[in-house]
Amino acid sequence: MRKNVRTVTLKKHLQQMDASNIRFTKRDKDFLADLAKVRLVGLKDAQSQHYGGKLDGCRKRLQKFVELGLLKERTVTQPGRGQVDKCYEFASDRIAKLYGGRTAGIGSKRSDLHELLVSKAYFALGRPESFKLGDEMTHLEKRALLMPVRGDSEGVTPDAYFMRDGEVVLLESDAGQYNSRQIAHKQASWAGNAQVWVQPNKANCRVPRDENVEVMRF
């Protein structure tokens, strides 16, 4: 659910003193709400989804938020391909929390390309209202939605899930590093659910499609 953050509250958390004249448009608020949901948004998606397809205006607006200390910018690359996109996340967990979100948490276990693919899938799917990241699933959600695997009472957690036509759809991001055995294991774990997989165009092993598995590639 979108959180309406009062501008006066946000200004107390911004690093720069020249935040006094900032005004948030509906486009800004929509962008920040989506950012809270997926934690990382690419410049191309911000341009097409929030800022009317105007690249220069989108870039300048987001750069302004970077300068104010609201956002942090990343350049996402892929081995063998180079730069994929400029991306934006909240500058800190303290600011992200105001919007009901978190920072992307990119590090040894999460790559920026992996997180970007989850985000791109969210937009390509039409920004489902029910979209929720896997690490935000509650214990009860896991018990209800995921099939137990090898003694694990909560099953294998996907990167995200959402509802479509009253059914649960599990989403998994492969940044191009999974092998065929890893893919097969996860697909088998989720055999009772519709699945959406997202990969870069250049991947170690392509995810096989079937009537229950949709694959997106960027």
Image: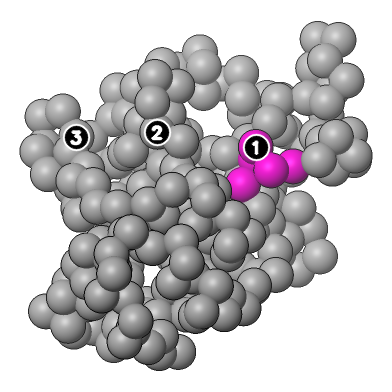
> Which residues make up the magenta segment?
133-137
Q: Residue furthest top?
A: 150
Residue type (three-letter) at the residue carrying disc 1: Asp
Residue 105 shown left or right of residue 9 in the figure: left
Residue type (three-letter) at the residue carrying disc 2: Ile
Q: Residue furthest front?
A: 17
Nearer-N-terminus badge (3/2): 3
Nearer-N-terminus badge (2/1): 2
Q: In this picture, is 6 found above or below 16?
A: below
Look at the image and say whether residue 41 sits in the magenta stretch.
Answer: no
The picture places residue 11, in percent across and down from the top left corner, at 44, 72
Q: In this picture, is 215 found above or below 152?
A: below
Q: CA distance from mark 3 to mark 2?
A: 15 Å
- Taking the spot 41% from the left edge, 85% from the top edge, the residue there is 24
- Taking the spot 68% from the left edge, 31% from the top edge, the residue there is 157
- Can I make out residue 35 in this image? no
- Under circle 1, the secondary element is helix
Q: Residues within 10 Å of mark 1 (few under 14, many from 20)?
A: few
The residue wearing badge 3 is 78
The residue wearing badge 2 is 106
Judge by depth and name the residue closer to the eye, 22 or 125.
22
Numbered mark located on residue 135 in the image: 1
Nearer-N-terminus badge (1/3): 3
The picture places residue 184, in percent across and down from the top left corner, at 56, 21
Magenta segment, principal secondary structure? helix
Q: CA distance from mark 2 to mark 1?
A: 13 Å
CB contact under 8 Å: marks 3 and 2: no
The picture places residue 203, in percent across and down from the top left corner, at 28, 30
Q: In this picture, is 40 found above or below 159?
A: below
| Residue 71 placement: quadrant | bottom left
- Taking the spot 61% from the left edge, 47% from the top edge, the residue there is 133
The picture places residue 72, in percent across and down from the top left corner, at 30, 52
